[in-house]
Amino acid sequence: MENLSKCEANYVPLTPLTFLKRAASIYANRTSIIYEGTRFTWRQTYDRCRRLASSLRSLNVVKNTVVSVLAPNVPATYEMHFAVPMAGAVLNTINSRLDSKTIATILRHSEAKVFFVDYQFVPLAREALKLLMEDSPESCLVAAESLIPLVIVIDDIDSPTGVRLGELEYEQMVQMGNPRFESGEIEDEWDPIALNYTSGTTSEPKGVVYSHRGAYLSTLSLILGWEMGTEPVYLWSLPMFHCNGWTFTWGTAARGGTNVCLRHTTAYDMYRNIFLHKVTHMCCAPIIFNILLEAKPHERQQIPSPPVQILTGGAPPPATLLEKIEPLGFRVTHAYGLTEATGPALVCEWQSKWNDLPRHDQSKLKSRQGVTILTLADVDVKDSETMVSVPRDGKSIGEIVLRGSSLMKGYFKDENATAKAFKDGWFQTGDVGVIHPDGYLEIKDRSKDVIISGGENISSVEVENILYKHPRILEAAVVAMPHPRWGESPCAFVSVKKNRNGKTDDIKEADIIAFCRKNLSHFMVPKKVEFWPELPKTSTGKIQKFQLRAIAKSFVLKESNNQINKKANKDHQPHEQILSLSRL
Amino acid sequence: MENLSKCEANYVPLTPLTFLKRAASIYANRTSIIYEGTRFTWRQTYDRCRRLASSLRSLNVVKNTVVSVLAPNVPATYEMHFAVPMAGAVLNTINSRLDSKTIATILRHSEAKVFFVDYQFVPLAREALKLLMEDSPESCLVAAESLIPLVIVIDDIDSPTGVRLGELEYEQMVQMGNPRFESGEIEDEWDPIALNYTSGTTSEPKGVVYSHRGAYLSTLSLILGWEMGTEPVYLWSLPMFHCNGWTFTWGTAARGGTNVCLRHTTAYDMYRNIFLHKVTHMCCAPIIFNILLEAKPHERQQIPSPPVQILTGGAPPPATLLEKIEPLGFRVTHAYGLTEATGPALVCEWQSKWNDLPRHDQSKLKSRQGVTILTLADVDVKDSETMVSVPRDGKSIGEIVLRGSSLMKGYFKDENATAKAFKDGWFQTGDVGVIHPDGYLEIKDRSKDVIISGGENISSVEVENILYKHPRILEAAVVAMPHPRWGESPCAFVSVKKNRNGKTDDIKEADIIAFCRKNLSHFMVPKKVEFWPELPKTSTGKIQKFQLRAIAKSFVLKESNNQINKKANKDHQPHEQILSLSRL
């Protein structure tokens, strides 16, 4: 039986590209994309993607060429999820909340040959390109041109603006292409399909590479885990630049769904589109719940039944938030994931026996991270030192580790980080959690060096590196501080050098924040800066961040506890004590 | 990005075995199996499978060893779907409707080392083993023992009978085993997991080999295609020996479902189990519809809502049958497949726009074979000669061809048949169909050499070979004849040698049928034998089966048209003409 060899008929490389071809064949006349007044069918989407792929080929985009895109959730971003790999290339969607410097770093590191830019982000892209050119080492000046990607602007397809950056425009590229273009088969399912930069735990963004196989398997898993049937109407409230929209860019094609594209995730736009197009499914970070909950009466619409299915993740949703959002006509499924896992790796699969519990208990169960998606071979919680599994008692804490074919290939051009991430046959998430006796996993602490603010990862190391660049800063440590709106936000603890008068009090919080705003993406800027004569350290000289974290936690607790009675305040006394002992 | 290599963490071989481990972890206390008074949970099922796997290992069952099983849909058959591959071996489920001779052929061809036999089939197995021993060539006598598999009886777990065949018994094997047995990882997802013999188009049954990868992908596809959510209650009305229960042996574990096992598919047993255990899903050939429809009042139970989902296939269900079965509380999804495709390859995916059509139009749409399951890369209908795709007009006829990773590895020990089946990068089904403009495929004629009777494939060539062994038969041709209950049944056309008196009329239909019953599995025996002086042939001497098929069709048409007016009869005149021209 072993000598039965693979052949073209029975061993076809797994790739999400088959989903589009299939959709064009069997859902040909179903609506694939709605964006304001613009609509396409699956047959049209397939044609447009083939056209764009052929145009890319004529621009010398070949196998493993990186094609970057900086755009909101418009039809072009969706189409590129198929067109770019159809041309054999690798799609790199860039987080549009990043600053020009980080974007320049990504363009340089990825060696992108083509850079698609939505008209709205032309100023940001122009700035990034300028930095990219300035930073090119002189020795490269002759070859400098090859370091600068070809720029193609994506004008608004529904209401063109005429904004340009260079000669080429997206729609023109599509129209020029050949709708009968045949991409040929993917040679190997291990070939890369996407490159997604994550702020992870280090200062430089790391390039997470997905294979066709991994993307394919993750897509199937998430459809299964969320039980998304055929013909969903999917609202693009989750940025496609987050793990390729948690694979639903490909998943809606697999299900013959309709993609409702959104330029802005305002309450008005979301409610309007949900109502107009009878949205059935959407994904988002919990921050979007706040936007939906805080909508003004004129921004709201009645959600028709059945409820809109929401898959949420990126940050653990507080049980209280779950309790508030569901009565508005939403039904939440909670997932946990990370860029390295191609989006969600765990889904809090609902059990029918929970149906009869009170709503609050249900929300508590739902706020747990859950169980592995089907294509992940295994999850475990291990002692980071010994790599021994912790008992499944809902109490024993350890590091969450994953393994399975839906994980990333590794970090682009970073062998060390790749080797470190894949240790002893497991991927180390850096997140800390427990396993309950029923097999459901719950996160107790995200990776110590990552702050999750409004669904975006912030590397504390990256922020600290910028702080250290300030001429007056001696020591800096950045930790997560609870934030009622963003979940967490960065809080900086710094000690400063004395000025010529031997004073330190001439430098203020506002100065440091302004300095950060100049040098960091705005969402990464510390919301609070604390001045200390010296930061607490271990005997070996390491800053004791756990102390700072406890203090940062107390800031918000203190504020929110102002109106609470003494007894409740007592619960937080330990933090207060640390505070009074260590503060300036 | 190419130099990012696979590692144990991110490239885990795809295998359905992960579904059981996952089920044991996250659905630990959910009921996995119900069989009369016996119940297991997923934790217990995992333990029992590990025990059995370790016992198999101690019997020297190693990688690629074939383990055969002849049993109805009892818990043991289900457990072996995991235990056998956990031991590294290949599961061979044998169709219990076969005769002892064919079973002996399968045991010999598969080189099975272990043979599990349900107590009910001990007489059949004993007969097969006897034939196996008799047929062993003399030169092998010394090594004869190795040709005879180790026999293990499966006694009824719910009401033990004490019937034995040799020393070993299934439950004892389970109890002896180690519940902490670790099977270790599958080395290669291309490794074989199952071996299923099919009567296909030739006289000898062919051994279809599935890989772990193919089984895994097919399982995911069918859950997706049928939209089977978590916690299904699945009734085993489809034999597990048919393509491993169309992969739902593995699929129910993936979904944390409950397997309701059935020894007999009588109307009484099916209704009783559906009602008692609130069955949500079941698969079956359309013949089961008849059993359910013809149930006597005391055998019936009211089906509670929501309706029981039925996935049907194996033979095209007539639209009229669909119309009758659904009002009883069932909802039918129609699939098309074959053993080589690991069960269903196409599913008639329902489109919401069909909801408003009259029931009869719905049934007509539903009786089409549909669209590819997600893990099948492609389907096409091609001219068999030129291999050019036919137009999608619902009229142009061609051969249905498939490609994708859910197809078989090939035929065991049959390179020629494997090479012939995989032609030009496609698997040739031998079935004839059209593609409608909406992308849905409809079968117009099953493979010319296969007769599907009550969901079982019958090879016309196999029946012909037996007929040719009759001393008086000169020529024989077997074709499908429509049958109101079984869908199709075999009809034989023969010409016979003259006896010493120069006569042919001394040999009767009953003689031929009796001869066939002695030499064939009973379901393969022709229901009708027609005597002709000579069979119609082409100029090259090939029997013109298309003529015989038309005639066989008219037999039933004639009968059913007895009460119909002349005008309707006129529609069938062409057949009548052929009949009168060519018959004796």
Image (cartoon, coloured by chain):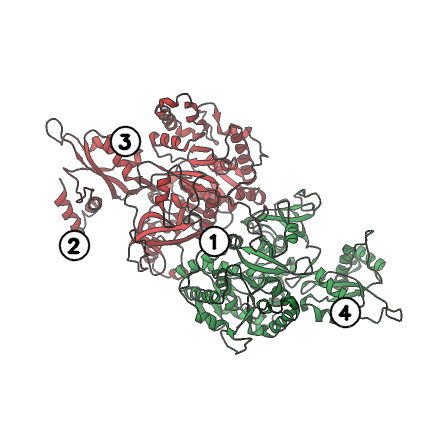
Chain colours: A red, B green
> Are marks 4 and 2 in one subunit?
no
Q: Is residue A269 left or right of residue A18?
A: left
Q: Which callout, 4 or 3, points to the residue nearer the camera?
A: 4
Q: Which callout, 1 or 3, points to the residue nearer the camera?
A: 1
Real-space Cα separation, disc 2 to disc 1, in angstroms: 60 Å
Q: Which callout, 4 or 1, points to the residue nearer the camera?
A: 1
Q: Residues within 10 Å of mark 4 (few under 14, many from 20)?
A: many
Q: Which mark is residue B512?
A: 4
What amino acid type is highlighted by mark number 1? Glu
Q: Residues within 10 Å of mark 2 (few under 14, many from 20)?
A: few
In the image, is residue A578 above or below residue A127?
below
In the image, is residue B170 above or below residue A303?
below
| Chain under numbered label 4 | B
Real-space Cα separation, disc 2 to disc 3, in angstroms: 40 Å
Real-space Cα separation, disc 4 to disc 1, in angstroms: 51 Å
Q: Which mark is residue B187?
A: 1
Give the residue furthest to the top: A142
Camera-nearest residue between B302 and A80: A80
In the rendered image, the quadrant that contains the C terminus of chain B is: bottom right
In the rendered image, the quadrant that contains the N terminus of chain B is: top left
Q: Tag 3, which secondary structure?
A: helix
Which residue corresponds to mark 3?
A: A517
Q: Which callout, 2 or 1, points to the residue nearer the camera?
A: 1
Q: Tag 1, which secondary structure?
A: loop
| Chain under numbered label 1 | B
What amino acid type is highlighted by mark number 2? Lys
